[in-house]
Amino acid sequence: MKRSERKKSRKLWLKIPLAIILILVLGGGAYAFSIYNNAKSTVNDKINEPVDTIDTKVAKKKIKATEPLNILLLGVDQRGGDRGRSDALMVLSLNPKEDTMQLVSIPRDTRTTIVGKGVQDKINHAYAFGGADMSVATVENFLDIDLDYYVRMNMEGLEELVDQLGTIHVDNEVEWDDGNYHFTKGPVEMDGDKTTHFVRMRKQDPAGDFGRTERQRKVIEGIINKGASVGSVNKINGVIDVLGNNMATNMDFDDMQDLLFGYKDVRKNVNSYMMQGSGTNIGGIYYYQVPAEEVAKVHDMIAGV
């Protein structure tokens, strides 16, 4: 499998744990209480991983006061004992006072200084060198911003997640065949394997990476819609287990609840942006070069949220 084909939806890694809490609210009764306890212990004991770069006390004060937040989303290709690389980096900015949400995508091949290594390299290599901590520091330095939280998801967990829910439905806009599945225009029902093929395709999409990002958004919506249905409540323990094995964040369970209830209206105004630049070859290695004016523009976009 090509590394370029393993990108998955990044908003998913933030929204799914929040959807779990929503389902708990809808569930009710002793069974919902047992799910709640399982979710809380999984998040606090398995998923919660603080990093030195982020001051957790400051972040908690901000989320309690429902102040604007910046969250780094990392989609990681991790197999076996290998740490892997962050095949996707996004900065999610939430402004509950204006009810706005902004998602900025950073191309994984972007050339920048890797904080802690002191070298110019692809930004996704920061995770391979120093995990989420170095990724946070590198993105903060690259965009001259402060990050309050990070969410890291092993992208291999997407298929398991969809299979735990059964199937999801999306409205497909581009017809194509990848040799495994034929995707027709219109409503499509997908299991986990079909979903991974749906989000990987790029070359047959006339919109390229932008088209793939749109398909990823549709997958998120499909997962959230299925997860929030009453019929899926009995599947939540399985979903929690998948997240426990594939996700890490410096949020604890209380932070997630505060995020869900204090920032729930930010979805009213959503803006997505992909950083612009151009490909270049340095020493026989491909890099994506983002000009200084583009970096300054994105800094202002995030700071203005």
Image (cartoon, helix red, strand yellow):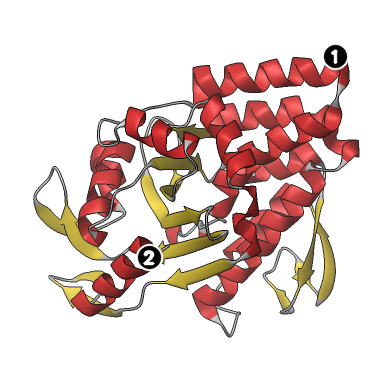
> In the image, 111: left or right of 192?
left
Q: Is residue 108 visible?
A: no
Q: Secondary structure at mark 1?
A: helix
Q: Position of residue 64 (x, y in %)?
A: 48, 34
Category of crowding for the residue at label 2, using alpha-carbon neighbours closer than 10 angstroms: few (below 14), some (14–19), many (at least 20): few
Write the residue at 15% across / 72% down: 282
Q: Position of residue 223 (x, y in %)?
A: 73, 49
The quarter of the rendered structure image containing the C terminus is bottom left
Write the residue at 65% across / 23% down: 39
Q: Give the residue type at disc 2.
A: Gly
Q: Position of residue 143 (x, y in %)?
A: 26, 61
Query: Is residue 264 or residue 249 the one in the foreground?
Result: 264
Mark seen at residue 283:
none
Instruction: Give the residue at mark 1.
Output: 30
Q: Is residue 16 visible?
A: yes
Q: CA distance from mark 1 to mark 2?
A: 44 Å
Query: Is residue 34 or residue 262 the one in the foreground?
Result: 262
Q: Closer to the camera: disc 1 or disc 2?
A: 2
Which of marks 2 and 1 precedes in the sequence? 1
Q: Secondary structure at mark 2?
A: loop
Instruction: Give the residue at mark 2.
Output: 304
> In the image, 236: left or right of 76?
right
